Image (cartoon, grey):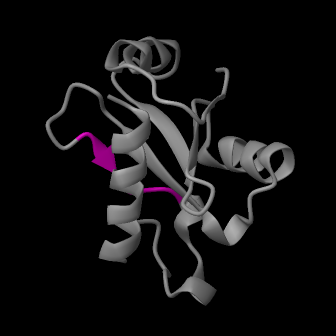
Amino acid sequence: MEIKIIKEKITKEKLKEIVKENYGDMTKAVVDIEKKIIAIGGEFHSDASTILVEKEGSNYENVWGFNVYPDREDRLEFDSLINIKPNKGNRDVIIGSDKIKQRIRNIVKDLIE
């Protein structure tokens, strides 16, 4: 499962192609909320997180994982092991901060039609 770095807007059709290559109806994704880039694909969120940190220079504290379901009305699911960040006040796999979730939604909206 290839991981694609999204820095510029892609279409919903392109997203669906990526999803088909991954889990069929969903794909894992990781976002750097400061750099406003997304890594989509891979077997685990940690794989995409590593790509952002090592190849894009992201700070791990700014990297959050989620799942994308392009055909669901509420297409984002904020559930990932990489979201456990006690020093950021998140002690669960689900992102608890509405502010962080909204930042992710905005970045996804800007990069994926």
Magenta-colored stretch includes residue 77? yes
Q: Compared to 47, does 72 lie above or below?
A: above
User: Furthest-right residue in view?
Assistant: 54
Looking at the image, residue 48 lies above or below residue 77: above
On screen, residue 72 versus residue 112, left or right, reads left
> Which of the 4 image quadrants contains residue 15?
top left
Residue 89 lies in magenta, yes or no?
A: no
Task: Give residue 99's position: percent from left, percent from top.
Answer: 35, 74
Residue depicted at 21% across the width and 25% down the height: 71
Percent across and percent down for residue 46 are: 67, 49
**From the viewer's perspective, is residue 90 above or below residue 33?**
below
- How many numbered dots are placed on residues in this image? 0
Identity of the residue drawn at 62% across and 88% down = 87
Q: Position of residue 19 (x, y in %)?
A: 43, 20
Residue shown at the point (39%, 17%) measured from the top left? 24
Name which quarter of the figure residue 8 lies in: top right
Residue at (39%, 62%) from the top-left corner?
A: 103
Residue 1 or residue 102, whichever sits in front: 102
Q: Viewed as shown, does residue 4 lie left or right of 58? A: left
Is the N terminus in the top left, top right, bottom left or bottom right quadrant? top right
Instruction: Identify the residue at the far left of this view.
Output: 73
Residue 89 horizontal/vertical position (percent): 50, 87
Stretch of the chain drawn in magenta: 75-80
Front position in the image: 10 or 92 = 10
Instruction: Give the position of the C terminus as an image quadrant.
Output: top left
Is residue 95 at all visible to an observer of this figure? no
79 with respect to 8 (left or right): left
- Reply above or below: 29 against 102: above
Report the side of 59 relative to 65 (left or right).
right
Q: Would residue 51 be seen by someone viewing this image from the given angle?
A: yes
Magenta stretch: helix, strand or loop mostly = loop
